[in-house]
Amino acid sequence: MVNIAVFASGSGTNFEEIMKHIEDGSLPVNCACLIVDHSDAFVIKRAEKHHIRSFFVNPKRYADKAEYETYILKILKEHEVDLIVLSGYMRFIGKTLLDAYPNRIINLHPAYLPEFPGAHAILDAFQAGVSQTGVTVHYVDEGIDTGPIIRQERVPIDPDWNLAELETHVHAKEYEIFWQVIRDVAAKIEKEKEQ
């Protein structure tokens, strides 16, 4: 079975969704650990509830990104992680992890890339007054939300929605597709491991 590590920075609603599908058997992977960059991230509480080991790695304790990621890499190797799943992780992935996990790091982005890259995609779409936005899952490369796209789906925007309503609809689409992409990518990794 493929071991995944989830990286998160905040409340962890997508982590919760992933765990739900692992526990009901529809997502046949093992969540080996959770990596967080904020000691007060609510996702840590969610991990405890699901008996998943979480590691708070404080980026401020390290001289640079390479040193920070080298420490994370040690944790990932100890837990035999095959796939890194970025679920609301608000840091750029650097060369250390990219080199160690080529095409093995996936990210969930709350917009239809290349539209609205960056940290405020839902707000950006709302303020732009567009008629639709979307959700994208992509492999991570050294750019900002530029890696090869695995799957994306549109979310039509009702002009009467406020920002909170738009967020709700985008998140619903995330919950619908993210676990499916993890399942499909994990199945590919499983095949590669067998060869």
Image: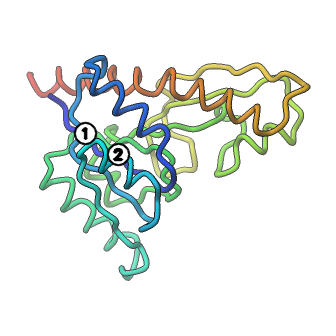
Task: Determine whether 20 is above or below 69 in the image.
Answer: above
Callout 2 crowding tier (Cα within 10 Å): few <14, some 14–19, many ≥20: many
Please state the total of marks drawn on the protein image: 2
Image coords of residue 146 (percent x, y): 56, 41
Q: For mark 1, give the secondary structure.
A: strand
Q: What residue is at 40 percent from the left and 70 percent from the top?
A: 65
**Residue identified by numbered label 2:** 6
Quadrant location, the N terminus: top left
Foreground residue among 184 and 40: 40
Pointers 2 and 1 in contact (C-beta within 8 Å): yes
Q: In this view, does 192 lie to the left or right of 17?
A: left
Q: In this view, does 173 lie to the left or right of 28?
A: right
Q: Which residue type does callout 2 highlight?
A: Val
Q: What residue is at 70 percent from the left and 43 percent from the top?
A: 121
**Residue identified by numbered label 1:** 31
Image coords of residue 145 (percent x, y): 57, 44
Name the image colouring.
rainbow
Q: Which residue type does callout 1 highlight?
A: Cys
Foreground residue among 161 and 129: 161
Q: What residue is at 67 percent from the left and 26 percent from the top?
A: 134
Residue 186 falls in which quadrant of the image? top left
Q: For mark 2, give the secondary structure.
A: strand
